[in-house]
Amino acid sequence: MNTKTIQFIRRGEIVSLANVPPTRTLLEVLREDLACTGTKEGCGEGDCGACTVVLGEADGDHVNYRAINSCIRLAHSIDGMALWTVEDIAAQDGTPHPAQEAMVQCHGSQCGFCTPGFVMSLFGMYQNHVCQGKTITRELAQEDLSGNLCRCTGYRPILDAAQQIGSLPPARINELDLLQKLKLLTHSGREPEANSTYISPKNLPALLATRAAHPDAQIVAGCTDVGLWVTKLHMQFGKVLDVTQ
């Protein structure tokens, strides 16, 4: 068995990571391997949102954006996707993204530890709502930020910031270029998954065949249970079978 190279899009470029163990979390890769320490580790359980990053996946002719907890997300699961961390969303000239600027203007940061996670959830909201011409209501902000905890209890200004991001100068992602790069990853002709320590079948027959061939592989889906076995019990698995797809 070999460790498949992980490839994803970050800052408009294809990032390739080799020799990543199958149970290494995305947060570990970001903080320890890529020195992206803006993404914080809080609970290590997927509860507090300090480690929030945003993933983008091709869906036909558009991109789906999703804010996720990187502390219990296995790194190999983002293969073929786009990734944004809090270091990635400002403009090249340093101009803050509306998600960042709104937090500044509304005084949404207190001790600051949770701020990167909130900013990334706001970034996800911006892509899914503001960029689609939708208005962010108070109720929508409360729902989309429900996975982020502020231990300083600074929720009111953060919700104010969520409602303000749509009024700031726009910051658009070149989705046409991003889609082309995501499709390039999909058709890159890399080594077969069956030989990997992290296997992610695309359909039920492939899943059943893989399970029969590797009965010892640890099955994962959302990783809300196995992720804690890794982060809290420090368990390691030689092979992982991801049923997400």
Image (tube, helix red, strand yellow):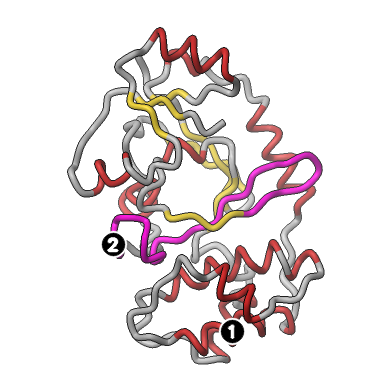
Disc marking residue 216: none
Reply above or below: 109 against 90. Answer: below
Q: Residue furthest left?
A: 233
- Mark nearer the N terminus (2 vs 1): 2
Residue at the spot 57% in from the left edge and 31% down from the top edge: 245
Q: CA distance from mark 2 to mark 1?
A: 24 Å
Residue at the spot 37% in from the left edge and 18% down from the top edge: 2
Residue at the spot 58% in from the left edge and 36% down from the top edge: 80
Nearer to us in this view, 177 or 161? 161
Q: Is residue 63 visible from the viewing direction of this image?
A: yes
Q: Is residue 95 visible from the viewing direction of this image?
A: no
Position of residue 150 measured from the top left corner of the image (x, y, whole percent) = 38, 78
Reply above or below: 70 against 192. Answer: below
Q: Are marks 2 and 1 in contact (CB under 8 Å)?
A: no
Reply above or below: 73 against 84. Answer: above
12 sits left or right of 135 in the view: left
Q: Amino acid at mark 1?
A: Ala
Q: Residue 147: say if magenta.
A: no
Circle 1 residues within 10 Å: few <14, some 14–19, many ≥20: many
Q: Amino acid at mark 2?
A: Cys
Position of residue 75 measured from the top left corner of the image (x, y, whole percent) = 41, 41
Circle 2 residues within 10 Å: few <14, some 14–19, many ≥20: some
Position of residue 227 measured from the top left corner of the image (x, y, whole percent) = 32, 44
Q: Secondary structure at mark 1?
A: helix
Q: Which residues are magenta?
A: 42-65
**Residue identifier under label 2:** 43
Residue at the spot 38% in from the left edge and 87% down from the top edge: 110
Disc marking residue 161: 1
- Residue 189 is drawn in which quadrant? top right
Q: Residue 43: say if magenta.
A: yes
204 sits left or right of 238 in the view: right
